[in-house]
Image (tube, grey):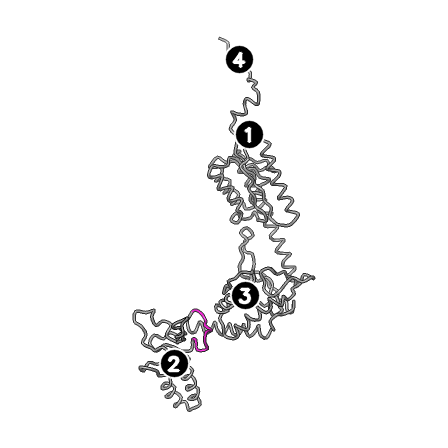
Amino acid sequence: MEKQVMVIPASQKDEAEIAPLVERKRVAGYARVSTEFEEQQSSYTAQVEYYTKYILERRDWELVGIYTDEGITATNTKLRDGFNKMIEDALEGRIDLIVTKSVSRFARNTVDCLSAIRMLKDKGIEVYFEKENIHTLDSKGELLITIMSSLAQEESRSISENVTWGLRKRFADGNFSVAYSRFLGYDKGADGKMEINYEEAKIVQLIYKLYLDGYSDYHIAGYLTAQNIPTPCKKEKWCVSTVRSILLNEKYKGDAMLQKSVTVDYLTKRKKKNEGEAPRYYVKGSHEAIIPPAVFDMVQTERGRRWELIKRTRLGKYSGVSMFCTKIRCGDCGCWYGPKTWHSGTRYEKVVFQCNSKYKKAEVCKTPNLSENDIKRLFVEAMRLSEWSDDAWSANVKSAVAYREGRELSFC
């Protein structure tokens, strides 16, 4: 029998009749700009408006929302809250399709881009890159995305190198910028250079004075907090690290060390202290000083002395509460004596010195507690004895510092 082929024509149904039978895709848009400059604001707004309209015009699409990141780089996804929320919602089954402008808007980091796309692909979720006309569920999609995201990553590397070159050129010319909102004592002047803020400068001078008066970084921070003096960021509580950074910053004596840190990874933007990886530039007399150079240098010398004392005494920190701190050693365990407040807040309150490890061991040290007046008396007596001969000094100092129950306390 001869083979016959019959054609069954397609049925012509009205579009309105088909539409209800087609399952609508839940679609989200993603928009991002990497800077907060005014010219980028229009781009950001335009992206949001465009994708809102673009999705709503499709009868087979349902708008889930427009996810956005403003002023965030695409080289790393960790800080992109909008992006991470979108991926989270998609993986939880709230989104079927993501629409974005281009691969570079989605991610410049090849690894991050492919990782996110593969996670979505495993859940059957598609990403559409409009500029490149790439659908990730397409068989060729991943190859094209790998190529495009690699190009985007290379573009980021080139931009990073150009920015770095520009910064080093500025540094070599002695030009630099300061984060004035977090820098105590200076404002940006009309000429763009550093200008002293005299009210804040008083706080800086106070910090240096307290340090040279014997206060530690910790006690300076506590004092400033107790006096309700605001921090450089206008917060109430001072951190030890903030005090330390002010005491170490050469800008307060009118100089500037440039390129103190370097970026070690242009993708993660991770920075580290410049330890010779890149040139540094020291600008002397770049602006008006708040702290005289001689005073600044005295502080650095004192910091060095205290650090050597910490290493020698193995206390782990410096105490400037009293002139006798780290000067008296326990005759039982060899630990240092420190001041302790007894009956605090009452009329019986007094300060005594005792071994800092007295109650930290199984066996309590038997060395006595000393009042500050006792210590001063012993100190004066020891200084008087120091005018004697070596033999007399040796014999009599031991006698002078022997106190209560024959326990020895030695001045260092």
Number of the front mark, 2 or 1: 1
**Upstream in sequence: badge 3 or badge 1:** 1
Which amino acid type is marked by label 3? Ile
The residue tagged 4 is 6
SS class of the residue under badge 1? loop
The kind of residue on which mark 2 rests is: Ser
User: Which residue, given by chain and number where applicable, does mark 2 sit on?
Assistant: 410
* Stretch in magenta: 316-325
Residue marked by disc 1: 60
Q: Are marks 3 and 4 in contact (CB under 8 Å)?
A: no
Mark pair 3, 4: CA separation: 92 Å
Mark 3 or mark 2, whichever is nearer to me: 3
In space, the residues marked 3 and 2 are separated at their CA atoms by 40 Å
- The quadrant holding residue 7 is top right
**Which badge, 2 or 4, comes first in the chain's sequence?**
4
Report the residue that reaches farthest toward the left: 363
Q: Which sits in the foreground, 40 or 173?
A: 40
Residue 141, percent from left and from top: 54, 36
Mark 3 Cα shell of 10 Å, populated few (<14), some (14-19), many (≥20): some
Q: Residue at x 32, y 74 (%)?
A: 365
Closer to the chain start, of discs 1 and 4, is: 4
Disc on the earlier residue, 2 or 1: 1
- Badge 1: how crowded within 10 Å, few (<14), some, or many (20+)? some
Tell which tag, 3 or 4, sits nearer the viewer. 3
Residue under label 3: 229
